[in-house]
Image: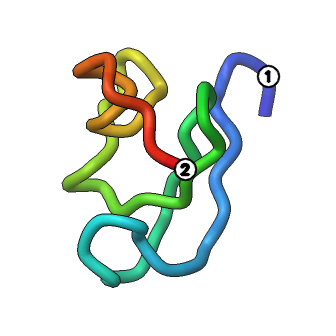
Amino acid sequence: MAGQHASMAGICVYCSMLATETCSLCGANVCGAHFNKEAGVCRACLLGKRIK
């Protein structure tokens, strides 16, 4: 899987839907709606507002 971001199934931290991605900055499990594939980060990290 060279060149791709790792994905992990779980619950999205924003909307409780199925999480299919993991933010490369904060490690949050997020759904596709809350993940920016180009940047490889969640919505909060993209906006500079990391969550814990």
For the residues bearing labels 2 and 1, Cβ distance under 8 angstroms? no
Judging depth in this view, the residue of 8 and 49 nearest the camera is 49
Q: CA distance from mark 2 to mark 1?
A: 28 Å
Where's residue 28, x and y in %? 56, 52
Name the residue at 41% across, 80% down: 18
Q: Which mark is residue 2?
A: 1
Amino acid at dot 1: Ala
Amino acid at dot 2: Lys
Where's residue 44, x and y in %? 31, 35
In this picture, residue 4 sits left or right of residue 28: right
**What residue is shown with label 2?**
52
Callout 1 environment at 10 Å: few (<14), some (14 to 19), or many (20+)? few
Determine whether the residue tagged by mark 1 lies in a helix, strand or loop. Answer: loop
Where's residue 1, x and y in %? 78, 34
Name the residue at 39% across, 26% down: 45
Callout 2 environment at 10 Å: few (<14), some (14 to 19), or many (20+)? few
Total numbered circles: 2
